[in-house]
Amino acid sequence: MNKLKDTKYLKTVHDAAKLDECIAEVAFVGRSNVGKSSILNTVCENKTLARISQRPGQTRTINVFLIGHKRWLVDLPGYGFAHGSRDEIATWQGMIEGYLLSRPSLREVYMLVDGNVGATKLDIQMVGWLEFNNISYCVVANKCDKISALEQVASRNAIALALRKKPEEIRWVSAKKGTGIRELQITIAANLKL
């Protein structure tokens, strides 16, 4: 049984300092249009939980979802390709960093990369930043349904090499087809001690 099915929208903030304390939380971060909201909806088995837009960069706030007693799933603004002024983009970056550095209850960051596109320069920078700040994270390659079975091994190896990981450390998922979702649900529930 999926313990994340009862997840509900809790709140939206522009500043992590306005968040209350919670027992445990996990966060989703990644490039704009990588499918953070789609993954969140799929792991929670609720297509309307997080808003999905066809236009990249629409998540511009910290969106918090509640599961159980004071346990959160957090959808962070995407980085790269976001539409907005330079000041707005800098604000979103500050919002992401402010959140990630200020949450003692943060158990894991699920860093999404596009399995079809591969690890971008921004993804490499994010991994370096997370490691520099000793923040626990897991790389999740989404959109694996867009890659043929023959190309998947090469793609996984390329992403792993770019992010200085072993190929088996990369979680290979598809929000559209459900590939790898059950395993992701299990690890999220474990991190939240559900």
Image: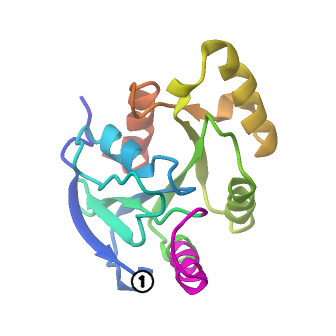
Residue 5 against residue 68 in the figure, above or below: above
In the rendered structure, the answer to whether residue 185 lies left or right of residue 1 reads: right
Q: How is the image coloured?
A: rainbow
Q: Does the magenta stretch include residue 87?
A: yes
The quarter of the picture where residue 119 lies is top right
The residue tagged 1 is 15
Q: Position of residue 49 (x, y in %)?
A: 24, 51
- Residue at horizontal 75%, vertical 23%? 154
- Specify start and end residues of the magenta stretch as a single range: 80-96
Q: Which amino acid does label 1 sit on?
A: Asp
Q: Which residue is drawn at 59% across and 41% down?
A: 114
Residue that appears at 22% across and 61% down = 9
Inspect this view and state whether residue 68 appears.
no
The percent coordinates of residue 74 (x first, y second) are 39, 61
| Location of residue 57 with respect to 39 vertically, above or below | below
Residue at position x 72%, y 60% in the image: 131
Horizontal arrangement in the rendering, residue 66 relative to residue 55 (left or right) = left
Residue 119 placement, left or right of 67: right
- Taking depth in this image into account, of 85 and 5 the one nearest to the observer is 85
The image shows residue 144 at horizontal and vertical percentages of: 55, 28
The answer to which of 103 and 83 lies nearer the viewer is 83
State which quadrant residue 116 falls in: top right
Nearer to me, 53 or 179 = 53
